[in-house]
Image (spheres, helix red, strand yellow):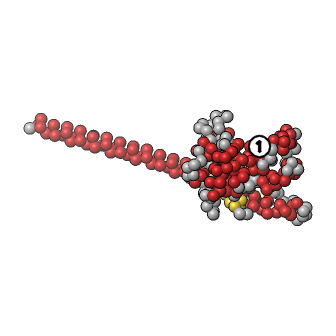
Amino acid sequence: MKTSLRRQRGYILLYVLGTLLVLGMLALSVAYKQRVGFQLFANNKERMQSELLIRNAAEYTLAQIAMSVAIEPLVQVKDPAVSKIERWSEGHTGTLDLDGQQVEIDLAIRPFPPDINQLDDAQLTRLFVSLGADAKEAEVFAKLIVGNRPPSGYPNFDAIRGIAAIPRQLIDGGIGEEDGRPKGLVDYLSIGTNSRKVDPVTTDLLLVAALTGWDESKLDKLRALRRAGEANAQTIKEIGPEIQPFLGAGDMYRATLRAVEDGRWAEATFISDRGKWKIRSFKLHDKTTPISEVDTEEEEAAKP
């Protein structure tokens, strides 16, 4: 009888110890999850604060761009009322202070590649020939694009790819990103940007020739101006008036905005849409991502 009672007490003791062990493990698990939850909340709060700060800086940058472009005509006529106003229309690098928090801003102006919706069949024909198409085929491809163009324009390059008669390689170029790969329409044009601008210094001469119809002698003059560092809107117009419609102020700004305190940063692009400036894209990066490792080519915004 005594032996049976001792056994029962032993079972009870083991049960109690097992229960305490399970409860202890549950308590540790809950505590760990709470710590993780608090840490995630703190990290998310920090990230949200950084994003809000950088977005505010982007909105401020947008306002500065719009103001700078708006007063540009007054600056050109040397209006004394605006001569002392800081303008961001020609680029800006500096530090913005927002309620004691600083954001570094690096702003650059570049035009989007010309919008395919803005090109006529003659320009597209010349471009297709430069991309390797036969002259007669190039003319057919160009007329297909212009003839099938919706009243509001093509919305994206997928709509162009839907024209089965045009080889995909002429649209998308070669496969891979190595130097020397064949290029296509996506490498030279944009869609949905309403752009008709080219950069006098950096635009590929192949595209200049396609847009203007310039022959090799005029392209040689442009090459000479570039080598001499004298390529600008005025000097290029003297080569031939055909380029006039494609010159003018840049219609896209790209900014890198970095929160000084925690190092998070963002890429933002700003475009003019029928005269109204707006933020086209905003991409936040973690502070551990070096800016130099991120592709910042403005054509990315216009690719499919």
Q: Position of residue 232 (x, y in %)?
A: 85, 48
Name the residue nearer the viewer: 72 or 9: 72
In this view of the protein, can residue 156 be seen by the observer?
Answer: yes
Q: Which residue is mark 1?
A: 205
Q: How many marks?
A: 1
Q: Position of residue 233 (x, y in %)?
A: 84, 51
Q: Is residue 52 left or right of residue 231?
A: left
In this view of the protein, can residue 58 be seen by the observer?
Answer: no
Name the residue nearer the viewer: 51 or 185: 185
Q: Amino acid at mark 1?
A: Leu
Q: Quadrant of residue 273?
A: bottom right
Q: Position of residue 2 (x, y in %)?
A: 11, 37
Residue sitting at x 75%, y 58%: 65
Residue sitting at x 69%, y 49%: 125
Q: Secondary structure at mark 1?
A: helix
Name the residue nearer the viewer: 251 or 107: 251
**Which quadrant does the N terminus fall into?**
top left
Circle 1 residues within 10 Å: few <14, some 14–19, many ≥20: some
Residue sitting at x 49%, y 49%: 38
The residue furthest left is 1
Name the residue nearer the viewer: 172 or 192: 172
Q: Is residue 47 left or right of residue 117?
A: left
Residue sitting at x 79%, y 59%: 68
Q: Position of residue 264 (x, y in %)?
A: 63, 46
